[in-house]
Image (cartoon, coloured by chain):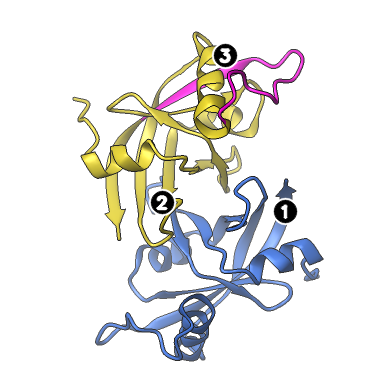
Chain colours: A yellow, B blue
Amino acid sequence: MAQPFSQNVVALLEKKVFANIATIMPDGTPQVTPVWCSHDGTNVVFNTARGRQKDVNLNHDPRVSICLVDPENPYHYAEIRGHVVEMTELGADAHIDSLAKKYLNLDAYPYRKPGEVRVIVKIAPDVVHVVG
Amino acid sequence: MAQPFSQNVVALLEKKVFANIATIMPDGTPQVTPVWCSHDGTNVVFNTARGRQKDVNLNHDPRVSICLVDPENPYHYAEIRGHVVEMTELGADAHIDSLAKKYLNLDAYPYRKPGEVRVIVKIAPDVVHVVG
């Protein structure tokens, strides 16, 4: 059953924290890049686009690791190892706009590309380590 | 043949930048945590200890991905995908002290544990992406 995040992880996720999300390339190589993120209480939620490396990798292997480093203190971080529970286009445009609000204080995501199909990715935690 | 890093990657590596290093757990799950780092011109160099998760993982699979996010601008980052070319205890105590100097301005690493055996890990880049 899904467990809610602890208060200190929720506090991190509600900052303008970048989620360094590690996925596995189809050839087995790790891949890690920083992304905006939110949460729904029990899952880390981020947003990518169809055809991007994270979309390709997660359709191939749903396992991820996420490192959230506190933007106010680099010695305080959480590592969340988990797996994708949902990838959906439903509501993904509104979600990227909400992330633009959180991170840039803009009402609409300013980097949208013509033809881009946004995807919400929800990750359930399996193991959470909080350090610092 | 080893290629030297571009000037913008060297500039990032010489800041107090944290390397979010993704490795593969023996069960195939990705793992990512932030570590101090340096470089030798052609390799990213970091320091772990025998028995730590990164030591275990890299002895099992030498492939890594490193995300270096500019501490002064989170929208400027480099992703370096590469592989371990050397893991050695030789000089590893002096190296962790040099990282304590770089990151904490201390002459000696203050978190050394009794019996801990430090290890230098050198990672050669295979693919480098710089964003922002």
Asked whether the residues under marks 3 and 2 belong to the same chain, the reply is yes
Does residue A47 appear in the picture of this structure?
no
Chain letter for the residue marked with disc 1 in the picture = B
Q: Is residue A52 magenta?
A: no
Image quadrant where one finds the C terminus of chain A: bottom left
Label annotation for residue A38: none
Q: Which residue corresponds to the image point at 77% horizontal and 62% vertical from the top-left?
A: B8
* Three-letter amino acid code of the residue under disc 3: Asp
Chain letter for the residue marked with disc 2 in the picture = A
Magenta span main SS: loop
**What whole-number distance in Å separates the C-alpha atoms at marks 3 and 2?**
27 Å
Q: Is residue B71 above or below residue B15?
A: above
Q: Which residue corresponds to the image point at 53% horizontal and 34% vertical from the top-left?
A: A103
Q: Secondary structure at mark 2?
A: loop
- Mark 1 lies on residue: B127
Chain letter for the residue marked with disc 3 in the picture = A
Q: Which residue corresponds to the image point at 49% horizontal and 30% vertical from the top-left?
A: A102
Q: Secondary structure at mark 3?
A: helix
Q: Which residue corresponds to the image point at 64% horizontal and 15% vertical from the top-left?
A: A117
* Contact check, label 2 and label 1, Cβ < 8 Å: no
Q: Give the side of residue A23 with respect to residue B132, left or right.
A: left
- Mark 3 lies on residue: A93
Q: First in sequence: mark 3 or mark 2?
A: 2
